[in-house]
Image (cartoon, rainbow, N blue to C red):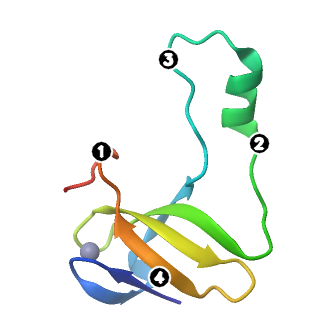
Amino acid sequence: MLITCPYCGPRDVSEFTYQGDGNRQRPAPNSQNLDAWNEYVYDRLNPAGDHNEIWQHSGGCRIHLRVVRNTLTHAVSSAVAVRGHHGGKP
Ligand SMILES: [Zn+2]
């Protein structure tokens, strides 16, 4: 599987680290909505098809990427830099 880093170009997936589901919305830190926290911590999507994921180019420029990967074929249709994500550059 290849992921095209916007800075480094196409690279093997072994250079990247999966950072998690890109669909989750973290509740406000002072939120006491336990259902929202439970959903954030435990609930995961498991689609058969395109899935939004966060990956880090840990073996390269270390930028965080928002990747759309097809879970059936592992085809990557999109990989863009995450703005404002911890460790993201632009
Ligand atoms: Zn890179």
- Dot 4: what SS? helix
Disc 4 residue crowd, few under 14, some 14–19, many 20+, Cα 10 Å: some
Task: Give the number of the mark in front: 4 or 2.
Answer: 2
Label 4 – label 3 distance at C-alpha: 33 Å
Task: Residue 16 in the image: state x and y as whole percent.
Answer: 42, 72
Which residue is denoted by mark 1 in the rendering? 84
Task: Residue 66 in the image: state x and y as whole percent.
Answer: 44, 63
Q: Is mark 1 within 8 Å of ligand 1?
A: no
Label 2 – label 3 distance at C-alpha: 18 Å
Determine whether label 3 and label 1 are within 8 Å by CB: no
Amino acid at dot 1: Gly
Sequence-first tag of 1 and 2: 2
Looking at the image, in which quadrant does ligand 1 appear?
bottom left
Sequence-first tag of 4 and 1: 4
Amino acid at dot 3: Pro
Disc 3 residue crowd, few under 14, some 14–19, many 20+, Cα 10 Å: few
For the point 69% across and 14% down, which residue is it?
33
Which residue is denoted by mark 2 in the rendering? 43
Which residue is denoted by mark 4 in the rendering? 13
Label 4 – label 1 distance at C-alpha: 23 Å
Label 3 – label 1 distance at C-alpha: 17 Å
Task: Residue 85 in the image: state x and y as whole percent.
Answer: 34, 46
Amino acid at dot 4: Val
